[in-house]
Amino acid sequence: MFGLAINFDEFNKVIGWLYRHDTQRLDVFFSLMVFLLPSILIYAWRRHKEMEEQMRRRILAEQENALSDLSVLRSLLPLYPSCKRVRDDKGYWYQVEVYIEARLDQKPALALCPECAKKTYRHED
């Protein structure tokens, strides 16, 4: 009962303040602050949580997709680690470049890794 009386007294103070400043239309501003601002904050917080959940789901889906792609590639392309040759369906072994060129009907883009570049183009200072 005491808490209700205190709240009612505070409410009367706010109403009295609004009546005193009625010419300045502070009641509209006060109403906006009381109702609109918390609504916007609640909406922004909910939207933030939804976006975090979406990102979490997307990351998990991408990780699962990458793992499944990797397992498919491992099963499709047997590679001998010593000579870096690839075995086809008939059991023949090919250089990786030849195998890719035959399958894609294109020549693979060749590049030089940094370690090979150091070995190949060694600069003597």
Image (cartoon, grey):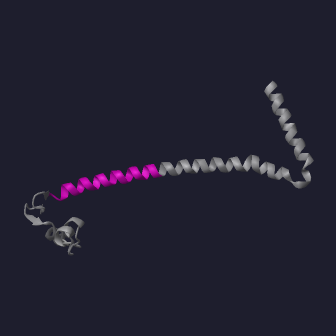
Magenta stretch, main secondary structure class: helix
Instruction: Return the x and y of residue 6 as percentages of the image width and height.
Output: 82, 30
The answer to whether residue 113 is above or below residue 50 is below
Q: With 48 as the anchor, is 13 left or right in this view?
A: right
Nearer to me, 91 or 110: 110
Q: Position of residue 115 (x, y in %)?
A: 21, 65
* Front-lying residue, 75 or 120: 120
In the rendered view of the protein, which quadrant contains the N terminus?
A: top right
Residues in magenta, as a range: 55-78
Is residue 100 one of those drawn in magenta?
no
Residue lying furthest front in this view?
A: 125
Residue drawn at the location 22% of the way across and 70% of the way down:
112
The answer to which quarter of the image holds residue 125 is bottom left
Q: Give the image quarter of residue 78.
A: bottom left
Give me the residue at 17% from left, 59% from top.
77
Magenta segment includes 71: yes
The residue under the point 9% across, 61% down is: 83
In the image, 105 versus 42, the foreground residue is 42
Rendering coords of residue 20 (x, y %)? 92, 47
In this image, 19 relative to 105: left or right?
A: right
Q: Which residue is at a point 84% across and 28% down the rendered structure image?
A: 5
Can you tell which quarter of the image residue 72 is in? bottom left
Question: Is residue 87 visible from the viewing direction of this image?
Answer: no
In the image, 37: left or right of 114? right
